[in-house]
Amino acid sequence: MYESMAAQARNAVEELIDAAGMKAGQLLVVGCSSSEVIGKRIGTCSSEEAAAALFGGLYPPLGERGVFLAAQCCEHLNRALIVEREAAERYGLEIVNAVPRPKAGGSFAAAAYAAFTDPVAVETIRAHAGMDIGSTLIGMHLRPVAVPLRLSVTQIGEAPLVCARTRPKYIGGERAHYRGDWA
């Protein structure tokens, strides 16, 4: 069961990275309800095993492409994010003092914290793309113009999967000209 979840996560993140045109050094926010993944209601049955499987599927492809993972915590930590210190420093993110646990921050964020080289918590980011596994509401951590992406992977385990990329705002009105590669 967990092997198939890890494979679904890997397939989804690889497809998302390609569809979003992500580049090395960019940020991908992932919100994940391990409860939803195992078929339970969000916040009711945190699963460290499911979270570890999903992290194990997501993290290697991100590392291979140099994309930073931002693991969103649950509402018990006000949806703070766990990132590598390198990402926090690169983007000038304010570090806060919090360590996620399975029932206070979420199993996925706790798995990221345990696996990262130098993990820190930050309150907010403006990610280049996002992956929402189980309706965790990641929108507050995306850049202002989010564009939904339809992937071939529509769920991971029992949880619905929603993904987005971002693009720069179009400004200037009817006489303005725009680059076509950000459509």
Image (cartoon, rainbow, N blue to C red):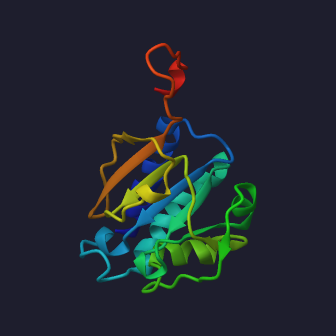
Q: Nearer the viewer, residue 55 or 163?
A: 163
What residue is at 33 percent from the left and 41 percent from the top?
Answer: 152
Image quarter of residue 85:
bottom right
- Relative to 66, say whether 149 is above or below: above
Q: Position of residue 80 (x, y in %)?
A: 53, 72
Which quadrant of the rendered structure holds the C terminus? top left
Q: Position of residue 53 (x, y in %)?
A: 46, 68
Q: Nearer the viewer, residue 124 or 27?
A: 124
| Residue 151 as seen in the image, left or right of residue 179 | left
Q: Nearer the viewer, residue 94 or 35?
A: 94
- Relative to 78, say whether 132 is above or below: above
Label total for image: 0
In the image as oriented, which residue stretches furthest toward the top?
A: 175
**Residue 15 visible at all:** no
- Relative to 18, say whether 153 is above or below: below
Image quarter of residue 75:
bottom left
What residue is at 51 percent from the left and 48 percent from the top?
Answer: 143
| Residue 40 as seen in the image, left or right of residue 85 | left
Q: Nearer the viewer, residue 67 or 47?
A: 67
Q: Position of residue 49 (x, y in %)?
A: 43, 78
Which quadrant of the rendered structure holds the N terminus? bottom left
| Residue 114 as seen in the image, left or right of residue 108 | right
What residue is at 30 percent from the left and 49 percent from the top?
Answer: 154
**Residue 144 visible at all:** yes
Q: Position of residue 4 (x, y in %)?
A: 37, 61
